[in-house]
Image (cartoon, rainbow, N blue to C red):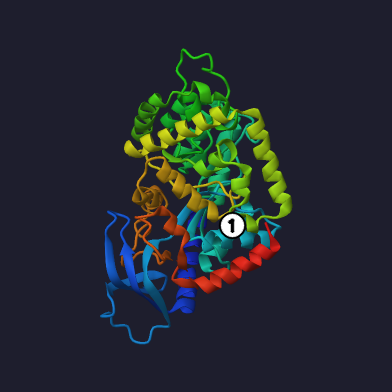
Amino acid sequence: MSKRLTFILALVVLFSASSAIWAESNGTTVIGPVNVVSMKDGSIAPNQAVVLRAGRIAQISAYPEIDVSEPDVRVDGHDGYLIPGLSEMHAHIPSSGREQYARDILMLYLANGITLARGMLGEPWHLELRELLATGAWEGPRLVTSGPSFNGRSVTSPRQAAEMVRMQADAGYDFLKLHPGLEPDEFSALATAAHEVPIPFAGHVSFAVGLNAALQAHQATIDHLDGYAEALIPPESSQYGVQPQWFGVNLASAMDPARARDLALNTARAGVWNVPTQSLLENTAGARTLEEMLGRPCMAYVSDDLKRRWIARVEEMQSEVSLQDRRQFIEARRTLIGELQDADAGLLLGSDAPQIMNVPGFSIHEELGFMVASGLSPLEALQSGTLNVSRFLEEDDTGDVIAGYRADLVLLAADPLQDIGATRQILAVFRNGKVYTRPELDRKLDQIRSRGL
């Protein structure tokens, strides 16, 4: 029996066991009255009661007509708005040996309504952590994890790249993470081996490879809109062929937003998804001031040492690139995000946290706001972190509030379809049916704040 088949069989046993563990601890939960928000069409079913059982949405009926005798838990819905749990599709999960830090990062995600995280720089311990989160032994979102990075240092030849693909697939990682520095022949060998296994590959676009090759190879996701800045430059420009710095901020004056439409259509035809991580670029290469970013409430969770490091990176960027160029860069990216949405080239919600000025969990709400600022409707922005993720992962029981679906949910005090900022107004989070009330979330957040990241 192959290592991969053995791993898959082990997962079947694991998840069967995990369902029993969650069900045993959760019992039956009734939430109501709530307004159930559909991610499919944005319709809202008012005055509903939602029954959770064994980690699933067991029933949705009118409130209070629902008949559930003596549920284990009753959650007052406060006439709030129930949406599916959000996803952080460009998360960074701490490495082994830092247990408390890892627990804090995972709880910051969960407390902000994130019930699924895609870890973008994996290691063997993350396979174990994925199981701990699946069984409920650790608190946090469901984890999708990559293996160690494919980059200009870890990959030494096409043959070695292909072997590395097979090793990571056999180990049981969900996908492969690409970083810069790959040569075209190495990328081609990697892509060929990955399609044969098969295992998705995602992340950066190496400068030597370029956007067209990534699209032709059907890279699963392009993160940070990497490679698009160079592609926005007309061939006649003196900046054409210049290597980008920090995702192309040095090329801002030469980027032509009018080229975004064709790039978006090409991306849609290739079936490649994008995780823009716009918040990372707005924070580091945008017009936001340090005072504005440091004054956000979420910075209370960041240690003084980490703040100093983040400040230094932002000051360096702001000193090297003019405000005008930074504004042009952000506007070009926003135009591209809007064109990708209009072309039905899939967008996925991700902020790249914890990275510069992106506090885990909180940054996903900023990301939603930036997606709306890029031309998406609040529903489309929410879909990028719910329904689109379900489509991308090829799951048929996630991404919406429907009977039979996973009980990964967020209860909001206000309607996010009217104001995307309402996603910050969390009354409760449900992870596999287990409820985290607002007072409980606040207690956990207070503990994290006292430690600092």
Asked whether residue 442 appears in the rendered view, the answer is yes
Furthest toward the right, the residue is 305
Q: Is residue 271 visible?
A: no
**Is 1 or 391 nearer to us in this picture?**
391
Q: Position of residue 423 (x, y in %)?
A: 44, 58
Number of marks? 1
Q: Residue at x 36, y 65 (%)?
A: 81
Q: Quadrant of residue 33?
A: bottom left
SS class, disc 1: helix
Q: In the rendered view, does 235 fall on the left or right side of 167?
A: left
Which residue does the image show at 34% across and 51% down from the upper left?
379
The residue where tag 1 is placed is: 297
Q: Quadrant of the C terminus?
A: bottom right
Q: Name which residue type carries label 1.
A: Pro
Percent position of residue 441, x then y: 54, 69
Q: Bin the neighbour count of mark 1 within 10 Å (Cα to Cα): few under 14, some 14-19, many 20 and up.
A: few
User: Is residue 180 shown left or right of residue 142?
Assistant: right
